[in-house]
Amino acid sequence: MISVSVKIIQDYIPKGRKNRPGYAMAALYITIHQTGNTSKGADAKAHAAYLKGSTAAAAPVSWHFTVDDKVIYQHLPVTENGWHAGDGTNGPGNRTSIGIEICINKDGNLSKAEANAAWLVAKLTGDVKTLKAFPGCMKQHYNWSGKNCPAQIRGRKNGWSNFLKAVESNLKTKKPAATLGSVDRIIGVEVDGKKVAESGVFYDGATYVKASYIVGLIGGNVTGHGDHIKIALPKIKDTKKLESELTSLKLKIKNAQAALL
């Protein structure tokens, strides 16, 4: 779970331009680049403008995200390929990887830009389900074409391994427990005026009873499946009987809620 966030501005290259090829992509990898542009003002916004211009279209060159020390610009959907890896029209870098460029403009904060890129990578590993598991999804531009890129990261001792550690740190970060609320007390439950074995909780200003118990009152069933639950309600074909069951259920829930409060 990622505890911080960086603003992502979608500013796509227009469809039909030569540097937006439009090939469908189920991304397997994330490729890290650094822009090579140290000029003042060569931030993410400036690169977004460049990619929509004639020079980038003529090259053609494109990638998915540009990251600076303040913001992230997205230039292509992650379901379309770009031309950024230097391994050809059908190369796996170009056709199966999401390209991220990190700004190195001298009026920016490089460390912060790299930290923002690490955050973005962590976010993408959760959002893009086709990616290989981290860190197997991670590539340098160098891995595809032999170019010394990302040059600043590669030029430091343990630069790449430290970048991967920064990504991993984002993946492991969790919200402080205090922000999740707390169970204040256990509450007894009464149904039709009779106390039952089931108990509820008063949690973060609200009252709760297990879904399985409430559904079970009408003869249904609740099962857990890791990231979701399935609720099976009883099949009642008789309309009058259904109305009676619903009336009874409403009364039972009302009595249960009254007992919890």
Image (spheres, grey):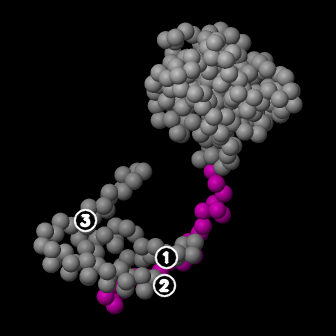
Q: Mark 3 points at which residue?
A: 233
* Foreground residue among 2 and 49: 49
Answer whether residue 183 is magenta in the image.
yes
Residue drawn at (34%, 67%) of the image: 212
Where does the image place residue 3, in percent across and percent down from the top left? 66, 49
Residue 195 vertical placement versus 236 (above, below): below
Q: Point out the stretch of residues depicted in magenta.
A: 174-196
What amino acid is at disc 1? Thr
SS under mark 3: loop
- Sequence-first disc among 3 and 2: 3
Which of pointers 3 and 1 lies earlier in the amino acid sequence? 1
Residue 27, how many percent across, how many down? Answer: 50, 26
Residue 175 vs 243, above or below: the answer is above
Instruction: Please tell me whether mark 2 sits on a helix, a strand or a loop.
Output: loop
CB atoms of marks 2 and 1 within 8 Å: yes
Checking the image for residue 207, the label placed there is: 1
Q: Which of the pair 100/22 is nearer the observer?
A: 22
**Residue on which disc 2 sits:** 261
In this view of the protein, can residue 102 be seen by the observer? no
171 drawn magenta? no
The reply to whether residue 71 is visible in this rendering is: yes
